[in-house]
Image (cartoon, grey):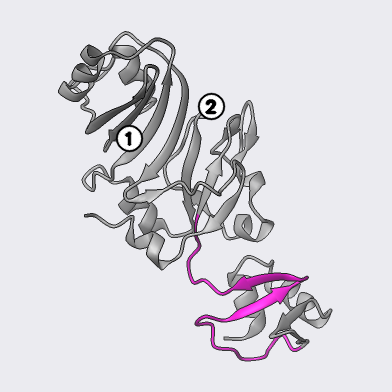
Amino acid sequence: MQLEKLLHSQGFGTRKECRALVRNGWLEIGGVVVEDPFLEVDPEGFEFTVDDQPWRYREKAYLMIHKPGDYECSHKPKHHRSIFTLLPEELVNRDVQCVGRLDEDTTGLLLMTDDGQFIHQMSSPKRKVPKIYEITAKHPIDQAQIDQLLAGVLLHGEYEPVVADSCELVSDTVLRLTITQGKYHQVKRMLGAVGNRVEGLKRVRIGALDLPADLAPGEWRWLEAEDLEKLKPA
């Protein structure tokens, strides 16, 4: 693959802009400046540096981000900043999208990709991907509320009860709740249905993939092969 085509596929601009990038000496391969935009390279595992920033060729982009509060999962936010402002321009140019959405005040693990098939697979209700949320409730959570959540609660506008797959009480007001559906404001509505209220909500796991303890709010990282394996059905 020619360098200009490879750079274009990785979000570094138009083909013309990528040619200029190389000719201006901004690209290095193995620490050596390369100025030929038509140089043929093997894209598999190809590593390079642009303006001192290391990159590796990825046919598809898969990443996780620790979503902070007061960010919207939209390119055109209405009330807060866009989650996409936390990503490098190259990833935005690749048109990465959120795999599902978190409310503006919900924090935690969010997946993003430019692979439409992956988004469809992860979002399909048939796949029943478990998602674990850490809920901070307004009032103490008692066993009766947990029993209701596990038995199923009927949400306003729904015709069938929504069931929690599991509930783990962390403290009097903190609950780890697992769901496999993805209904609008589901966790908040479920807690409201048992007479409580969500004061704080954080997604801490998708499938078998945990939010890394060392990934600070607003930071992102690539999903590697072992991470993607954790997202496959058990």
Question: What element does badge 1 sit on?
Answer: loop
At x 48% / y 66%, what residue is drawn?
Answer: 60
At x 40% / y 67%, what residue is drawn?
Answer: 225
Callout 2 crowding tier (Cα within 10 Å): few <14, some 14–19, many ≥20: some
* Residue 153 seen in this snapshot: no
- Name the foreground residue: 130 vs 115: 130
Q: Amino acid at mark 2?
A: Asp
Question: Residue 105 got which mark?
Answer: 2
**Magenta stretch encompasses residue 58:** yes
Callout 1 crowding tier (Cα within 10 Å): few <14, some 14–19, many ≥20: some
At x 28% / y 42%, what residue is drawn?
Answer: 130
Is 174 positioned to the left or the right of 167 in the image?
A: right
Return the x and y of residue 231 as percentages of the image width and height: 33, 55
The segment highlighted magenta reads: 36-63
At x 53% / y 54%, what residue is drawn?
Answer: 96
Return the x and y of residue 226 as percentages of the image width and height: 38, 65
206 over 222 or under it: above or below: above
Is 72 positioned to the left or the right of 143 in the image?
A: right
Question: Residue 37 got which mark?
Answer: none
Task: Provide the residue designation for mark 1.
Answer: 182
Extreme residue toward the front, this view? 171
Give the quarter of the image for residue 228: bottom left
Return the x and y of residue 158 as percentages of the image width and height: 24, 20
**Magenta stretch encompasses residue 200:** no
215 over 106 or under it: above or below: below
Question: What element does badge 2 sit on?
Answer: loop
Q: Kindly report which numbered mark, 2 or 1, lies closer to the viewer in this rendering.
A: 2
Is 186 positioned to the left or the right of 66 in the image?
A: left
Cα distance between the residues tagged 2 and 1: 17 Å
- Name the foreground residue: 36 vs 58: 58
Quarter the N terminus occupies: bottom right
Return the x and y of residue 87 as percentages of the image width and height: 63, 51
